[in-house]
Amino acid sequence: MGIRQNFGYNLILTLCNYLCPLITFPYVSRVLGEIQVGVCGFVDAIVNYFVIFSMLGVGSYGIREIARCGDNKEQRNIVFTNLMLINIILTIFAVAILLVCTFYIPQLQQHKELLGVGIIKIVFSVFIIEWLFQGVERFKYITLRSVTVNILYVLSVLLFVRNSSDTLIYYFLTTLVVAVNALLNWYNSRRFREWNFKSIDIRTYLKPVLTFGYYKILTSMYTTFNVIFLGFVSGDAQAGYFVTATKLYTILMAAFTAFTTIMIPRVSVMLASKEYTKLQRLSDEIFEILFSITLPVIFFALFYASQIIDIVAGDGYEGAVLPFRIVIFLLTIIGMEQIVIQQFLMASSSNRSIMMVSTIGAITGVGINILFTPSLGAVGSAIAWSVSEVMVLLVGVYFMKICTTVTLNYKNLLNALFWCLPYIVLDLFLYLTVIPSIGIWLALLSNIMLFIVLNFVLNRNAVFIKLLQPLLNKLKL
C-alpha cells in the first residue's frame, strides 16, 4: 500500500483518536468540573508514566525492526517473541512498583481507586502491539478498529457520566478503550506473528529497547512530568487548567502525527539503502506541509484563545487561556521534532544522538519546572514544556545533519511566514471589528477559505497538490 493511502488511513485514525476527546472533553469538563478534570489528568499522567516504564522502547524499536523484516515471517516471529517477553517482564515490575507507591505516598493514596483502575491500562498496553501492525503497514485495519472503539467510547461517556460523582466511571471507560483495543489486536495479529521460543535472545534486543526507552522516559520528564509535578505542588485545579490547555494542542497536532507515523518504515528503508538525496527531498516536503498548516493555526489560536477555551471547557477554566497561548507554539516546534527525531534519528539507529537529545530536554524541563511551576502554576508548566521542546529541537537538528546528512531548509520556514501575513491581517481585522462570540466562527471559515486560495490558487503549493491529486482529479480541478 502506498504512502498516500497509508497517510489517508492514519490521518483518519489519528483524527478519530483526538476528535473523540474533542467531543467528550467539553461535556466531561462541564459535568465533572475543573477539580475532577485535574484529578483525572493527574492520575492518568502517573499511570502513563508506568506505561512508559512497562513499554520503554518496545513500540518505537518494534516498528523499525518489524519493517526491516519485510516478508520474512520467521525473522518477524523472532523479533515479536523477544520484544513481547521484554514487555511482559517490564510490565510486572511496573505494576508492582505502582501498587507500592499507591499505598505509601499520601498524595497517591487518596486516589487509590482511580490508580487501581489505571492498572488495567498498564496491563493491556502490553497486548495492543500496535508496533506490529504499523511495522507491517496494516493501517486500514488499525483505522477501522480504532474508529469503531472510539465511537463506542464517546457514546458510553455521554450515557454513563452524568455528574461530578461519576469520575471513577469516566476513568474506567477511558482505560477500557485500551483493553478493548488490545483484545481486538491480539486476536487479529495471529496471521502476522507466532511465538518462537527456540530463538529467544533477550540480551540482543534489550539494549536498543532500553536506549529507546531512555529517550521515552526522559522525554516524559518535560511532557507527562509537568502534570504530575503540577498536581503535587499546585493542586488539582492548576492541573485541570494545564490539562485543558494541552488537550486542544494534542487535537490540533493529530493530522501531522498521522503523517509522521506512516513515514517511519519508509525512512528506515531509505536510510538502510543510503538514498540521501531522496531523504532530503522527503524532508523538505514534510517541513513545507508542517509550516503551511501549523503557522496559520497558531496565529488564529493566539487571537481567539479565550473563546476557544470557553468553547472547549466552559466556565471556570479562565486559568487555561494563558497556558494555551504558550503551548500553541508547540504545534510547529514539536511537529519539527517529529520529523527530526522520530523519522530521521530513530530510523538512523543513532542511539547516542537520541540519548543526548532526550537528556538535554529532561534536564531543561525538570529545572524550569522546579523554578517556575510552584509560583506560576499552569503557566510555569507551559513555559517549562515549551523551552524544553525548543532545546530538544535545536539539538536534534544538529544531530540530524551529522547522522543522515539531511539538513533543515530554513527557506521553507521563511516562505511559510511570508504567506502567513494574509492570515494575520484577516484575523486581526475580524478580531477588532466583529463580536468575539461570532467572530471566531467567521474567522475559522475565512481562514479555511484563505488556506485553499493561497495553497491551491496563488502559491500553487506543489506538495499539497501532489498529496491531494487523486481527489483533485475526481473533482476535475
Image (tube, helix red, strand yellow):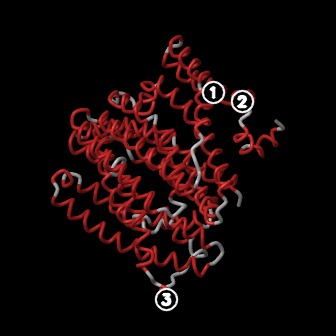
Task: Looking at this view, name the residue that lies furthest to the top.
Answer: 433
**Is residue 381 toward the left or the right of residue 188 in the image?**
left
- Identify whether 463 is placed above or below 258: above
Kindly indicate the quadrant of the structure image that contains residue 373.
top left
The residue under label 1 is which amino acid type?
A: Trp
- Local SS, label 1: loop
**Disc 3 marks which residue?**
198
**Disc 2 marks which residue?**
459
Which mark sits nearer the N-terminus, 3 or 1? 3
Residue 238 in the image: x percent, y percent? 28, 36
In-front residue for pair 181/409: 409
As drawn, the label of residue 419 is 1
- The residue that appears at 67% across and 26% down in the rendered structure is 449
The residue under label 3 is which amino acid type?
A: Lys
- Identify whether 333 is placed above or below 429: below
Residue 420 in the image: x percent, y percent? 59, 26
Cα separation, mark 2 vs mark 3, equals 58 Å
